[in-house]
Amino acid sequence: MNQAKDKFWEFFDDEHREYASEIMDAEAEYYEKSAILINHDLPDWGGVVLDIGNGGIINYDYKKLKKLLCADIYVSEKTKQKYRDMENIAFVETDITNMKNIKDHVYDAVIVQKVIHHLAVPSYTETKRNAVRALRECIRVLKPSGKLIICESTVSRWFELLEIVFFPLMLKMCDLIKFDKVYQYSPKSLEKLMRSALKGKATVERVQDIGMGKHVLFLGRKLPSRILPCSVTYYLVKKNRKVNKF
């Protein structure tokens, strides 16, 4: 966990820079589109929601929720202060691949925005296992019939094949440019991984390409999204009413 915190501090620390504000400004169109979909799929009556890895960005209507727990590998004091007057919001530090401090069957919905591609490690096999662990942990903490909402940065299939072939080189490049290690799935391969990992426990109900918008924040710069082989895919997954433990 300490190593993961160090990585977060290095790349996404908002104690010394306004990362949350930067990315919401640069990718405003994406956050507006994702908010519409998330608001639509959140319980109408409020409910108890877990948001994992938001980095201090809450772009949906959290005021209607009974309780919102924001979980991250590291939570800055600035983020806590930003929402200090919201009695329905709390923060906790945890690892999405092993959320030991999050109880089973508690949440009506779990939200995960642009997190899965950050679970890359030097081993390709272990990178995929991290994604599986994260997905299963998200389903574990959901109530029966609860919803898992995932907005994930995805790439064209041809680019994913390049990532697989040149996996060690791609991660070394991340180190050279001083960026967090990432591995991005194509929309279909991530859907396939979800269906395989959650078989018998949850059902993938909807898969939708929502795009990046006109710009993306990359290496601290606002760039035209058209120059990158990326998009954002929205997944709605529903936990089955009766499930056995993984």
Image (cartoon, helix red, strand yellow):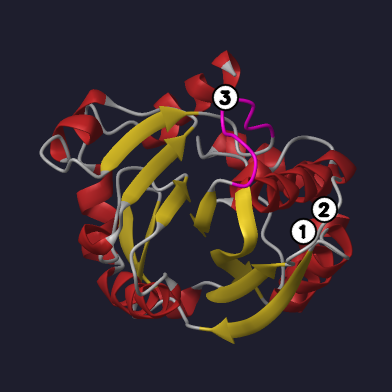
Q: Nearer the viewer, mark 3 or mark 1?
A: 3
Residue at image position (41%, 25%) is 9
Q: Are marks 2 and 1 in contact (CB under 8 Å)?
A: yes
Is the stretch drawn in magenta largely helix, strand or loop? Answer: loop
- Badge number at residue 166: 2
Residue 27, horizontal then vertical, whole percent: 31, 67
Distance Cα–Cα, label 2 vs label 1: 5 Å
Magenta stretch: give its range: 98-105
In this figure, which residue is indicated by the disc labeled 3?
A: 4
Q: Give yes or no for residue 80 being in the magenta stretch.
A: no
Type of amino acid under label 2: Phe
Residue 192, horizontal then vertical, whole percent: 83, 71
- In this image, 141 relative to 128: left or right? left
Q: Give yes or no for residue 104 being in the magenta stretch.
A: yes
Distance Cα–Cα, label 2 vs label 3: 24 Å
Q: Are marks 2 and 3 in contact (CB under 8 Å)?
A: no
Type of amino acid under label 1: Glu
The one of 160 and 81 positioned closer to us in this rendering: 81
Residue at image position (62%, 69%) is 154
